[in-house]
Image (cartoon, rainbow, N blue to C red):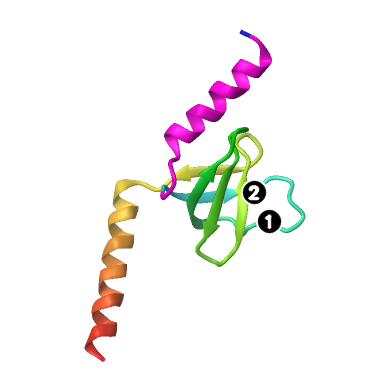
Amino acid sequence: MNKFEVERRFAQRMKDNYPPGTRILLLQMGDDPRPVEDNTRGTVKVVDDIGTLHCDFDNGRHLGIVPGEDSFRRLTTEELAEEQQMDETQDFGMKMI
């Protein structure tokens, strides 16, 4: 298998594992002049053809996450349920006003 095929398969694995809408937690950003803060949550918008995850972060930043350079993980089912519960609580509170 040549280098191009290895890179193509890697990018496809990233696309399969992190489809648009996947919630992630950025643990640490590698060598970036303006890194997103550690432990910031975000949503995957798209994974490009080299496997970079382009994300919208909850702090308003939009940046690509580079596997192998940046450290991140998918949010757990429990974390997603907690987010959902918080969203519902906030929505309910707004409706009560």
Answer above or below: position of 33 versus 12.
below
Q: Is residue 9 magenta?
A: yes
* Residue 82: x %, y % from top left: 30, 60
Q: Residue 84 colored magenta?
A: no
Q: Is label 2 in contact with label 1 (beta carbons under 8 Å)? A: yes
In which quarter of the view is residue 81 placed? bottom left
| Residue of label 2 | 29
The residue stretch that appears in magenta: 2-21
Q: Nearer the viewer, residue 59 or 7?
A: 7
Left/right of residue 46 with respect to residue 23 in the rendered view? right
The amino acid sitting under disc 1 is Pro
Quarter of the image that includes the C terminus: bottom left
- Residue type of the residue flagged with mark 2: Met
Question: How would you classify the magenta stretch by its main secondary structure?
Answer: helix
Residue hosting label 1: 35
Describe residue 5's horizontal placement relative to residue 16 as left or right. right
Seen at 58% across and 34% down, the residue is 51
Q: Position of residue 56 (x, y in %)?
A: 53, 58
Q: Which residue is drawn at 52% across and 45% down?
A: 46
Q: Looking at the rendering, in which quadrant would you find the N terminus? A: top right
Q: Using a 10 Å C-alpha cutoff, classify the residue at mark 2 as few (fewer than 14 neighbours), some (14 to 19) or many (20 or more).
A: some
- The foreground one among 21 and 58 is 21
Q: What element carries label 2?
A: loop
Residue 7 coordinates in the image, percent (x, y): 62, 23
Determine whether 12 is above or below 45 in the image.
Answer: above
Residue 80's quadrant in the figure?
bottom left
Residue at left 56%, top 29%?
Answer: 11
Question: How many residues crowd around disc 1 within 10 Å: few (fewer than 14), some, or many (20 or more)?
Answer: few
**x and y, in percent, of residue 16 in the image:** 43, 32
